[in-house]
Amino acid sequence: MPIDALGRPLRNLRISVTDRCNLRCRYCMPEAEYIWLPRESILTFEEIDRLAAIFAGLGVRKLRLTGGEPLLRHDLPALVRLLAGHAGIEDLALTTNGILLGRWAATLRSAGLRRVTVSLDTLRPERMVAFARSARHGEVLEGIAAATAAGFDSVKLNAVVIRDYNDDEILDLLEFARGRGLEIRFIEYMDVGGATQWDLARVVSQHDILETIARRHGTVTPLREGDWAPAERFRLDDGTAFGVIASTTAPFCRTCDRARLTADGTLFLCLYGERGLDLRELLRLGASDAEIASRIGATWTSRTDRGAEARAALAERGVLHQIDSLRADPRREMHTRGG
Ligand code: SAM
């Protein structure tokens, strides 16, 4: 298994299967128009599957399908079926906004998907209209119910907390998850590419999230699992567990074992990374598995990225990319790179 320059193994791969999305969340895709990856550049399922086998051979143990909205990719269960067949892959998960999950949850489960994370930022349909330009809140709730019924190893919820948008729903969201036996993770608003309206004043820190929860529920105990997961987990006295992903105020670059593959086959080693490795070109020019593995291994071995820590160390912190920079290279977008 390749180990990078800071001692971090390559164990985890996030695969974006499309840059398209059926939501327009203000913290991710606030613009009126986007430059999409050309269709012919999008990796086929066979190409993704071949790369997954190469990554598994290098030591990757966890795959997560993301996007864009991964359920917009035609026949995603067919890809899941391919990926679930790889020896070495211990975990196969999906991050989705849930809109199409009601239709697909059971099929994905029987295709071999193990875990699902659904993004749910608000329990108020009118807020979703204002914030994500979608009136499909009811479908998200149906998707969560279908995933819960489908028998996945776990169903989790993700909520990005933004001041004056949904920070008054932290307790309601926690209650919603608790009532359904689901674990929720609160995510700090990140200044990733695509977040062109990012503002530090809108970030609700892990500290503030925990304080809100403790005021209502009493002692919040950190579980201190010390593993490589992005979320730090906590427990309430009644046993309810939840997580906080504090990438903005308390970044965890030192334990980041994740690489990201864009839908067009560019490998990034950091959500904030500027340059990627073009694996599509290698695939389509006829490189052997061994050659591709060696390029990935060499790239990972020289990895020094600490993107979130570097952002946190800035004296003046504003948006990462202005619109022109995103238009010049759509791979800088969160929805292309895969969250
Ligand atoms: N469409 C899928 C979804 O909604 O879960 C998968 C892709 S989405 C880019 C993955 C995750 O990134 C979501 O949970 C989303 O909330 C999160 N995300 C996007 N922009 C973010 C930002 N600026 N700060 C924090 N999280 C963000």
Image (cartoon, rainbow, N blue to C red):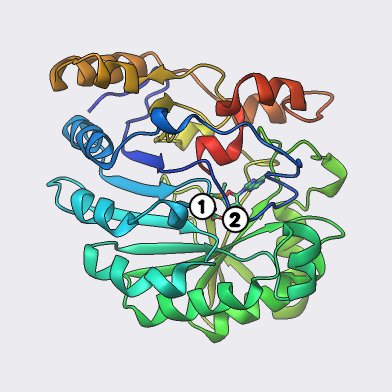
Read off the residue under disc 1: 69
Whether pointer 2 and pointer 1 mark residues with C-beta atoms closer than 8 Å, the reply is yes
Q: Is residue 329 left or right of residue 46?
A: right
**Callout 1 secondary element:** loop
Rendered location of residue 28, percent (x, y): 68, 45
Asked if residue 185 can be seen in this view, the reply is yes
Q: Residues within 10 Å of mark 2 (few under 14, many from 20)?
A: some
Q: Is residue 191 left or right of residue 5?
A: right
- Whether residue 218 appears in this view of the structure is no
Mark 2 vs mark 1: in front: 2
Kindly identify which residue carries mark 2. Answer: 22
Placement of 205 over or under 142, stated as above or below: above
Q: Say left or right for 248 vs 87.
A: right
User: Label 2 sits on what residue type?
Assistant: Asn
The circle on residue 123 is none
Q: Could you tell me residue 177's position as x and y percent?
A: 57, 77
- From the viewer's perspective, is 326 left or right of 85? right
Determine if the C-beta at disc 1 is less than 8 A from ligand 1: yes
Residue at 46% of width from left, 43% of height from top?
18
Regarding mark 2 in the picture, which secondary structure is present there? loop
Q: Quadrant of the N terminus?
A: top left
Residue placed at 55% from the left, 27% from the top?
331
